[in-house]
Image (spheres, rainbow, N blue to C red):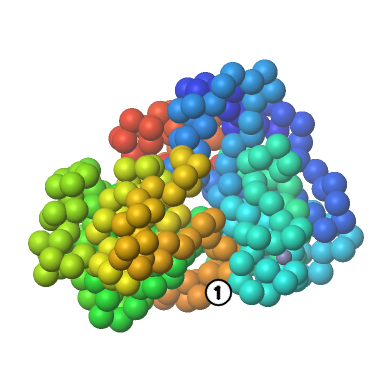
């Protein structure tokens, strides 16, 4: 079968690889119908050292169940499913607490352990706990929005939950990538009164406004902090969604939270240390977040997608075939696309 393999910075190729197959009795084999490229795929795309074997990319997908292992109970061949970026058994103590990304039998797609989903097929461990059967046909018009439930919409929602967004709150979203834009959707959905998006790309800002952003701050660093304070009576916002992961973005996030506020971070940190520790301490700011347990959020978000109340699929502004996936990486890396869908 064909699959996307990253061999080093800037070197992503479509390769012929051994067919995906069942290994464990709890596995399902899924034929991928849609995948996508994630902002987090761009970190290794920018920085990975050369590898002869490469890394199999992709952790977001919708597909059709082709085969199930002997212990799989809830799925059958032919089911259309959405695949969260992490697999989980749905049964352990952390899954019961809604923290599926800490599942004791869990892990992540697109790693050395489990191959990626930017491929013709993918092996899904812990299939009963991981996959969610979709109540639509495989070419339904809602497919782009349903695909975001595998990562970016659930991740934006997690940022909002971690930042304690609620009715009447003031919110800032740091980052205008697909996750930040979904964070705007999530903040509005949870009842935020004011939503300030920090970003500087005209097309993304326009979409953020359509998703519910009330204010735009295009400055950076100290000037951005100043602008947010001006927009919030000098205090800063209750809730900050940090959707980038860089030292500077985290520093900005803490600096624009009002005393007693919260920062929900979902951008994978590119630093070992937590920036802005001192202002976070002196302003009693809660810093929370991490890899989103998107599996836990599908049930909650799905009705809003099915009934058209939210349209996170609008973050996809380019569709490529599997063979064109390297072009998709370039487009996202060059900021020529917000998010790329791979259609198989
Ligand atoms: Zn678990």
- Tell me residue 39's x, y (percent): 44, 42
On the image, which quarter does residue 279 sit in? bottom left
Q: How many marks?
A: 1
The residue at the point 13 percent across, 55 percent down is 227
Choose between 184 and 2: the one closer to the eye.
Answer: 184
- Residue on which the image places disc 1: 299
The residue at the point 39 percent across, 73 percent down is 164
Extreme residue in the bottom direction = 167
Q: Can see residue 140?
A: no
The residue at the point 62 percent across, 59 percent down is 101
* Placement of the C terminus among the 4 image quadrants: top right
* Placement of the N terminus among the 4 image quadrants: top right
- Tell me residue 230's x, y (percent): 10, 62
Q: Can see residue 46?
A: yes
SS category of the residue bearing label 1: helix
Choose between 224 and 73: the one closer to the eye.
Answer: 224
- Tell me residue 132's x, y (percent): 63, 66
Ligand 1 is found in which quarter of the picture?
bottom right
Crowding at mark 1 (Cα within 10 Å: few <14, some 14-19, many 20+): few
Q: Is ligand 1 within 8 Å of the beta carbon of the residue shown at mark 1? A: no
Decide if residue 325 is on the left or right side of residue 127.
left
Decide if residue 163 is on the left or right side of residue 14.
left
Decide if residue 88 is on the left or right side of residue 202.
right
On the image, which quarter does residue 153 sit in? bottom left
Choose between 202 and 98: the one closer to the eye.
Answer: 98
The residue at the point 45 percent across, 55 percent down is 266
- Tell me residue 74's x, y (percent): 76, 70
**Up-down relation of residue 45 to residue 71 (above or below):** above
**Up-down relation of residue 164 to residue 287 (above or below):** below
**Up-down relation of residue 15 to residue 335 (above or below):** above
**Up-down relation of residue 316 to residue 104 (above or below):** above
């Amino acid at each position: 079968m064909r699959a996307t393999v990253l061999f080093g910075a800037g070197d992503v190729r479509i390769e012929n690889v051994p067919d995906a197959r069942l290994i464990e009795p709890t596995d399902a084999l899924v034929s991928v119908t849609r995948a996508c490229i994630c902002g987090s795929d761009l970190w290794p795309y920018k920085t990975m050292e050369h590898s002869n074997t490469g890394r199999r990319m992709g952790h977001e997908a919708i597909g059709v169940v082709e085969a199930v292992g002997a212990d799989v109970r809830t799925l059958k061949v032919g089911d259309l499913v959405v695949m969260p970026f992490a697999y989980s058994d749905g049964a352990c103590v952390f899954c019961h607490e809604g923290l599926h990304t800490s599942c004791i039998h869990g892990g992540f797609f697109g790693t050395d352990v489990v191959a990626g989903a930017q491929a013709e097929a993918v092996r899904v461990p812990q299939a009963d706990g991981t996959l969610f059967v979709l109540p639509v046909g495989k070419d339904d018009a809602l497919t782009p929005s349903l695909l975001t439930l595998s990562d970016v919409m659930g991740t934006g929602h997690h940022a909002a939950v971690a930042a304690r967004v609620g009715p009447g709150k003031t919110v800032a979203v740091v980052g205008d990538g697909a996750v930040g834009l979904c964070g705007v959707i999530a903040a509005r959905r949870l009842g935020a009164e004011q939503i300030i998006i920090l970003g500087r790309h005209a097309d993304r800002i326009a979409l953020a406004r359509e998703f519910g952003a009330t204010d735009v701050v295009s400055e950076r660093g100290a000037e951005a902090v100043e602008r947010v304070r001006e927009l919030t009576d000098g205090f800063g916002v209750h809730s900050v969604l940090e959707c980038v992961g860089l030292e500077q973005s985290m520093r900005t996030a803490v600096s624009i939270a009002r005393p007693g506020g919260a920062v929900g971070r979902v951008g994978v940190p590119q630093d070992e240390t937590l920036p802005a520790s001192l202002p976070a301490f002196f302003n009693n700011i809660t810093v929370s977040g991490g890899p989103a347990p998107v599996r836990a959020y599908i049930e909650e978000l799905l009705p809003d997608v099915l009934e058209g109340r939210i349209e996170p699929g609008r973050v996809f502004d380019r569709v490529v075939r599997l063979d064109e996936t390297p072009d998709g990486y370039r487009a996202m890396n060059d900021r020529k696309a917000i998010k790329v869908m791979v259609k198989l």
